[in-house]
Amino acid sequence: MRLGWVVAAFAALVLLLGVGLTLNPREVPSPLIGKPAPAFELPLLHAPDKTFSQKEMLGKVWVLNVWASWCPPCLVEHPVVTALAQSRLAPVVGLNYKDARDDALPWLKRNGDPYEFSVFDLDGRIGIDYGVYGVPETYVIDRRGVIRYKHIGPLTPEVSRKKVQPLLRELAREG
Amino acid sequence: MRASLLALALIAGVALAQADPALEKRVTGLAHELRCLVCQNQTLAESNAPLAVDLRNQIREQLKAGASEQDVIDFMVARYGDFVLYRPPFKATTLALWAGPFLLLALGIAVLVRRLLRRRAPGPQLSDAERARAARLLE
């Protein structure tokens, strides 16, 4: 009887710690999910004299991908972002985060430019508004301009296939 | 280019620090309450990750513009969630966090008390016949 209790308590502890092991402490749930995408107006990376505001995407489902040329994981996820953009499920806009044009433009030339266009967030201010803390990050924004999903860290083929793409299809149907 | 910018920012930071020690004190005070999202077990005050520097500058700017401590904390929570607070608020989702240790403590005390009481309880009483037999054996 007593042994039973000890075994039960031990099993409970193992279960608790086991679940703890599967959680990722770096994945901080974003309070921005379900909230309107923070407003911004930023110059384009390719054309500093033109600007883009998130308002222009109202009525469209779109993806915002935060990247930088100094960020190795961005290079890792680049093929996945490229494939996502090529799937034509939704336009992918780049947010070039705390980068230099002289570095960012050659980076895109070298690795391919999957973005409709990239906006240029030199001092990372808009990044702060979007709660960016680990580049790369990826946001899915619906027609009403509400953030529906956020992925922190490099987009993996699994996340793209199992989370992002189904969500984009669903949001496209929502109309 | 980047290095010179950084140096410039440092100089500017130092200049600011000297400009208004009271403000710097408030910035540091707040920065000690907020978690650096990059190196999660450090506060914004301790961390030198680029994001921590940016966020400290944010705090400084907002305080300078007349924001209260609570305004700045609300600004951070709106972007990074309760996780950014070193002292998480007491609410439904953090109930286990706050109450858990006390529950475990109460459970531990309950088990201990039970054991102690059981130990103090006298063992089974002997019947008169058994007593007589024991006395005989001990003689």
Image (spheres, coloured by chain):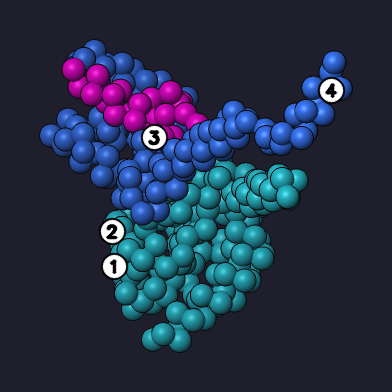
Dot 2 or dot 1: first in sequence order is: 2
At numbered mark 4, what does the secondary structure look like: helix, strand or loop?
A: helix
Give the residue pinned by disc 3.
B86
Q: Nearer the viewer, residue A153 or A58?
A: A153
- Closer to the eye: label 4 or 2: 4
Chain of the residue under label 3: B
Asked if residue A125 shows in the view, the reply is no
Which label sits on residue A55? 1
Give the residue pinned by disc 2.
A39
The magenta region covers B22-48
Residue A175 occupies quadrant = bottom left
Asked if the residue under mark 3 is in contact with the one under mark 4, i.e. CB atoms within 8 Å, the reply is no
* CA separation in Å, label 4 and label 2: 97 Å
Residue A137 placement (x, y as % from top left): 50, 54
Give the residue pinned by disc 4.
B136
Q: At x 56% / y 32%, what residue is drawn? A: B117
Q: Is residue A27 left or right of residue B99?
A: right
Q: Nearer the viewer, residue A51 or B11?
A: B11
Asked if the residue under mark 1 is in contact with the one under mark 2, i.e. CB atoms within 8 Å, the reply is yes
Q: Does the magenta stretch include residue B125?
A: no
